[in-house]
């Protein structure tokens, strides 16, 4: 695991955006895995800026989102589909026919939908770079604690803590879905590279468990310990519970020299 500790959330976003820009500039048919939540919003702002000011081209990019609420219309402003359009897709030149979310409506079978989503990822050649956030309870996507470490895209019931954490995004009289389709932990581990962004001290405990804790379904993000190319980009607050911060800062400075010469990707 490559752990990168930066000063503040803006630096985390800028760093993550460099990975994305390098990937889409280098690859003929890049496949991006995308995330929702508050954390990646600043990454998407950086990508929009790169498109507008540096003419970064997204026309050849295919994307797959981690998750989507169950039985929600794409037009509903609370849907992750609407989130992605507002924050990214409508502001760059991606072909929206090549953007995919694991949707499942009322009369659709979640198992069939999950399988179809997995097949689409395979058909696209797999995900090159999966962007992730982390829940305060250690979830990635909507893989809540106790999720099978070998899970694939499926319907999950959200925990009370996640519902509480996300309730800030819903108006008092607005329906908050309690179930969501999410890529499984195995689906996420299949990505060539994963880049997890975490900011703020409310993530510090989960971040520490992910990096230094045992590999356990109790902290689904700890499954990233099994990934060959997992990059974790943190601000100081999110890194605050890590005991070996000095090592990570030193190791990252060493890595930086390699990256400056050869780029981020192998
Ligand atoms: C949400 C999403 C996750 C996200 C997490 C943290 O529920 N399903 O993909 O990483 O919670 O969100 P935030 O960045 O808003 O803290």
Image (cartoon, rainbow, N blue to C red):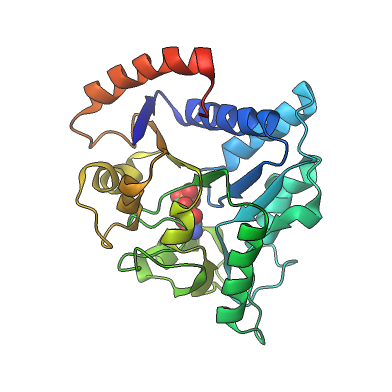
Apparent side of residue 47 relative to residue 177 in the rendered image (left or right)? right
Spot occupied by residue 11 in the image (x, y as percentages of width and height)? 49, 25
User: Image point 26% across, 33% down: which residue?
Assistant: 240
Apparent side of residue 65 relative to residue 186 in the rendered image (left or right)? right
User: Image point 75% across, 28% down: which residue?
Assistant: 56
Q: Quadrant of residue 139?
A: bottom left
In the rendered image, the quadrant that contains the N terminus is top left
Against 149, residue 15 (above or below) is above
Apparent side of residue 33 relative to residue 132 in the rendered image (left or right)? right
Apparent side of residue 266 relative to residue 204 in the rendered image (left or right)? right
User: Image point 50% across, 44% down: which residue?
Assistant: 192
Spot occupied by residue 53 in the image (x, y as percentages of width and height)? 77, 23
Along the line of sight, the residue nearer the viewer: 176 or 188: 188
Spot occupied by residue 98 in the image (x, y as percentages of width and height)? 76, 54
User: Image point 33% across, 33% down: which residue?
Assistant: 237
Residue 160 seen in the figure: yes
Residue 46 seen in the figure: no
Against 113, residue 12 (above or below) is above
Along the line of sight, the residue nearer the viewer: 262 or 129: 262
**Direction bottom: furthest residue:** 107
Against 170, residue 195 (above or below) is above
Spot occupied by residue 12 in the image (x, y as percentages of width and height)? 48, 30
């Amino acid at each position: 695991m490559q752990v990168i500790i930066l000063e503040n959330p803006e630096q985390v976003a800028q760093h993550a955006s460099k990975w994305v820009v390098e990937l889409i500039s280098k690859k003929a048919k890049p496949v991006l895995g995308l995330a929702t939540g508050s954390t990646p919003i600043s990454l998407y702002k950086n990508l929009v800026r790169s498109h507008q000011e540096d003419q970064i081209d997204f026309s050849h990019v295919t994307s797959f989102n981690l998750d989507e609420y169950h039985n929600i219309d794409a037009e509903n402003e609370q849907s992750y589909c609407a989130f992605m359009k507002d924050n990214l897709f409508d502001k760059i030149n991606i072909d929206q026919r090549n953007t995919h979310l694991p949707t499942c409506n009322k009369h659709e079978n979640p198992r069939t939908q999950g399988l179809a989503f997995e097949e689409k990822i395979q058909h696209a050649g797999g995900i090159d770079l999966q962007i992730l956030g982390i829940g305060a309870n250690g979830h990635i996507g909507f893989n809540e604690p106790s999720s099978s470490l070998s899970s694939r895209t499926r319907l999950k019931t959200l925990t009370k803590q996640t519902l509480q954490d996300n309730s800030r995004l819903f108006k008092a009289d607005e329906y908050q879905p309690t179930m969501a389709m999410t890529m499984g932990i195995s689906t996420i581990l299949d990505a060539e590279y994963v880049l997890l962004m975490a900011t703020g001290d409310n993530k510090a405990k989960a971040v520490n468990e992910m990096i230094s804790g045992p590999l356990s379904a109790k902290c689904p993000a700890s499954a990233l310990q099994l990934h060959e190319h997992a990059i974790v980009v943190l601000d100081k607050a999110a890194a605050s519970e890590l005991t070996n911060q000095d090592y990570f800062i030193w190791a990252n400075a060493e890595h930086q020299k390699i990256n400056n010469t050869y780029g981020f990707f192998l």
